[in-house]
Image: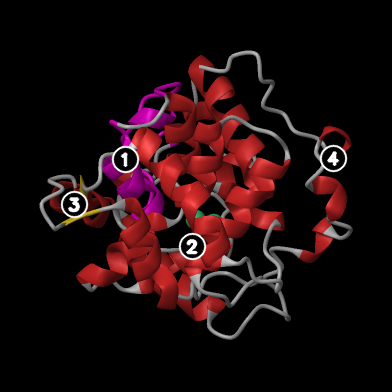
Amino acid sequence: MSQALHPNITAADSAFLQTINDTEHFRHYDDEARDGVKDLYRENHVNQTLDFVLAQKAKYGKLDKLEMGIWDALEKMNEFVDNSDPDLALPQIVHALQTAEAIRMDGHPRWFILAGLIHDLGKVLTLFGEPQWAIVGDTYPVGCPFSDKIVYSELFADNPDSKNPAYQTANGIYEAGCGLDNVHLSWGHDEYLYMVTKDYLPKEAQWMLRYHSCYPIHREGAYQHLLNEQDEETLKWVRAFNPYDLYSKCETLPNVEELKPFYQELIAEFFPAKIKW
Ligand code: FE
Ligand code: FE
């Protein structure tokens, strides 16, 4: 699968990144963060326990909630605004198309463009009544100590797992070097969409979808002791994806109707008309 494409994209070889003049402007959680971002993270950090994550994986892993096509899911997301995002208050279909178009601009393979289009579709969890704290926000390992590299890490003081001695040893429930695929991350749209789409996509795309919100690991370099050799490759692809997700957010709206034929064809190349959610 496209092994020739080196995934480390720098501003110098990305036409897209050269259109961005101020990357420092994104992901600021301090005084200027949008109202509600910290409140969202408070709920997230208090409630994301290992037990909660395992229960959600069991519940949604059955994929017995509904059958729906990818484009239908995108349209359903039209009204959803992510309260954890300090950078953008636009509907998700806009973010999906902005991300995919930025990847397309850089001439990446079609599966990579598709990954951009669908990467946040796990937010359809909102259709099943899940609260935002169980859908959005950065993800992080559970079942082991919470790293201070996680955004608003002080809010974990009220998470019951912080007081569970079994989870507070250096590796918690894991073995050193067990690898990212064997670590339970906090539950949200990443893991859910990975479950829904994994049978249809190349593994590089699966990594991008499954780990794109795990900033403590892919950006901050935390939890190195749990990673293995494979994860170097895995995280390369996650990091290659990240700038398109983060820096394509802008107030200029894509023309959905104009782009629809291209993306419907792309979706049909990889997915059947309907998939299980
Ligand atoms: Fe996301
Ligand atoms: Fe996104």
Camera-nearest label, 1 or 3: 1
Residue 91 seen in the current view: yes
Q: Which mark is residue 11?
A: 4
- What amino acid is at disc 2? Gly
Q: Identify the residue position indicated by label 3 in the image.
A: 60
Q: Label 2, label 3: how many angstroms apart (C-alpha)?
A: 19 Å
Q: Identify the residue position indicated by label 2 in the image.
A: 137
Element at badge 2? Answer: loop
Residue 158 seen in the current view: no
Q: Is residue 136 magenta?
A: no
**Residue 143: quadrant of the picture:** top left
Q: Label 1, label 2: how many angstroms apart (C-alpha)?
A: 20 Å
Residue 277 on image: x %, y % = 21, 52
Element at badge 3? Answer: helix
Mark 1 and mark 4 in contact? Answer it, CB < 8 Å.
no
Residue 12 on image: x %, y % = 88, 35
Q: Earlier in the sequence, mark 3 or mark 4?
A: 4
Q: Which residues are magenta?
A: 170-199
Q: Earlier in the sequence, mark 2 or mark 3?
A: 3
Mark 1 and mark 3 in contact? Answer it, CB < 8 Å.
no
